Image (spheres, rainbow, N blue to C red):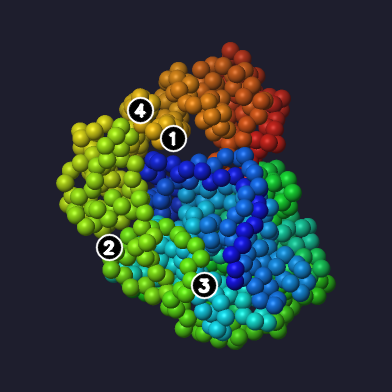
Amino acid sequence: MRRTSITLSAAPVGPDNPLPALGTPDEVHRLDERERAALPADMARQIGYAPLRSVLPVRIRDGYGRDRAPVAVDALRIENDRVAATVLPGYGGRVHSLTHKATGRELLHRNPVLQPANFGLADAWFAGGIEWNIGATGHTTLTCAPLHAARVVAPDGGEMLRLWEWERLRDVPFQVDLWLPHGCDFLLVGVRIRNPHPYPVPVYWWSNTAVAQTPGTRVLVPADHAWHFGYERALRRIPVPRWNGADRTYATRTGHAADFFYDVPATARPWIAALGEDGHGLVQTSTAELRGRKLFVWGNGTGGQRWQRWLSGPDGGDYLEIQAGLARTQLEHVPLDAGAEVSWLEAYGPLEADPAVVHGDDWTRARTAVAERLDAVLPDEWLRAAAAEWSRCADTEPKEMLAAGSGWGALEVQRGGYELPGTPFGAASLGASQRPWLELLHTGEFPDRPGPLIPLDHSLVAPHWRDLLEAAPSGCAADYHLGVAQWYAGDRAQAVRSWERSLRHAVTPWALRCLAVADAEAGEPRRAAERYAEAFAHAAGSDADPDLTTAALTALAREAVPALLAVGRADEAAAILEQLPDEVRSRGRFRLLTARTSLARGDAPAARALFDAGFEVADLREGDEVLAETWFAIAERLVAGDGPVTEETRRRARTEHPLPPRYDFRMRPA
């Protein structure tokens, strides 16, 4: 094991959004009660269990752009005589590359670019490699965040790479141990999630593996049925491999982006493989605790293909994802009892099988042949024995730190007095973000900071922190953070009262913005727009640090402009956009807002000119069709002129003004 670096064409992740994420995440994997009622009882129960209300206390990471440059990214390389793996500790512990030395084959989709995009629970996410998803349905908030990393003694006496962090959505510590036994073709990965609390917590885990996709790549799995989930947001049980006239185990034979959650029998060994036309490829298997298996495909639609190029660049190539999780689908969360832990062992490595059988018409024979090859190169008994050996090393203390994560785990350990052998959250990791919360913990008071843009501290929302805030003396910062915690807990009326009390101590754009969100949620859009305008004006009049002011104005304008447009105050929305620094106004998100504002002011040609000049909305959300919607709204007005927009003008708009491919990110059928 050694430190190294790799050069990637990367866009900086940029600063976090300073506004607390008060809204419900726009997660596409969501079902209503009627749809859940038609599912198996245990699946329906887990889909309805503890859905995520908010990504609080995590901040949204939307400060990135689309300008990339070659960057040396810190990495850790682990290898034996057969396999080499490259891990990025600063990016969620992502396994960037897994190379089989004997054949020289790269087993993963090794993305040549590091381009954040709005696919994660906390926004920023990037494609490629093997990603460790914990917390709640969606890509982990840690995907673009650093993890603690250390060298640990492996079960066979060699070296093991340990990654760990405190997962803040569910307030649980976890660890990922990676090692390569001598003479073994497989990367072994031991995962442990612990619940140190005296109450149950919901847990979620999916290991997502991106592999190269060709027309001849077939995904094989020990299942005859799957649960299909598309962007029309419906879950249905379908046969494997053929459904609706096509073999869906080939990613290129599905029209639009979709998930296939395989119904692997409880008695079967869990595994999933992606094998090319020549019968070679990658297989992933695990001990029985990791039950779920999934295939994700982008599909052949224009939008899916556009997303591929958006995430991997023009030379990155197509990819698909094979995944493994704790539940059958990614819509489910699993309860973990008080004081309990769950752990398992995964293995990733090369596999080859007779291509004539792998790609034959007999599905049972094809998957059986792959299962037999897996048993030959990595027997299930061997894996279970390796899991038992690893479990005896899971508490081994690190012998050398290799990278540092956040200080949030150290803060929770100090508050709760937890003993977590093997994953130390030392006081040395505590930083400025944790300092005011330490003061609250030790003195009972939350500090107020002088200045026109207070308070900027991260908000914590867990019940124990809310209790401390409720007992603390009233103050601008204490009441503001208390309001955020109360909002998270569902006590909206008390949250509003706390934010109003905060404003009586000092007027801040943060409390005004929170009240604007509360107004919008209460069905008062006009009052919300007024609050947003006041919050922006207060930030614009600040003489604080320019970088701080720019961050505040950017975040506030992003929410204020749509709120003003929604109530017909387009001129005020335009005035807000004009006050932004040129660098902010030139970003794709704000060029889109400018186009929408021009349209609302009756200037469709100006709106269209912005689209014709070209822009990229770097933080476009997965599944968001705002670009297409805005384009066609402009086209309809151009066709209708001064007259009304009718069905005929809508039809003509779509014929005469087709959506350019560069703006087509639609991931579902029309």
Q: CA distance from mark 4 to mark 2?
A: 36 Å
User: The C terminus lies in which quarter of the figure?
Assistant: top right
Could you say whether the residue bearing mark 4 is in a helix, strand or loop? loop
Could you say whether the residue bearing mark 3 is in a helix, strand or loop? strand
Could you say whether the residue bearing mark 1 is in a helix, strand or loop? helix
**Mark with earlier residue (2, 3):** 3
Disc 1 target residue: 547
**Mark with earlier residue (1, 3):** 3
Instruction: For label 4, count other residues whose C-alpha is less than 10 Å away and answer few (under 14), some (14-19) or many (20+).
Output: few
Name the amino acid, label 3.
Arg
Q: CA distance from mark 4 to mark 3?
A: 47 Å
Pair 4/2: label in front = 4
Total number of numbered labels?
4
Disc 3 target residue: 151
Disc 2 target residue: 415
Depth check: give the residue in front, 555 or 637: 555
**Mark with earlier residue (1, 2):** 2
Residue 52 drawn at (x, y percent): 41, 54
Tell whether label 2 touches label 4 (CB within 8 Å): no
**Mark with earlier residue (4, 3):** 3
Q: CA distance from mark 1 to mark 3?
A: 38 Å
Could you say whether the residue bearing mark 2 is in a helix, strand or loop? helix
User: The N terminus lies in which quarter of the figure?
Assistant: bottom right
Label placed on residue 543: 4
> Who's the residue at 61% across and 40% down the image?
66
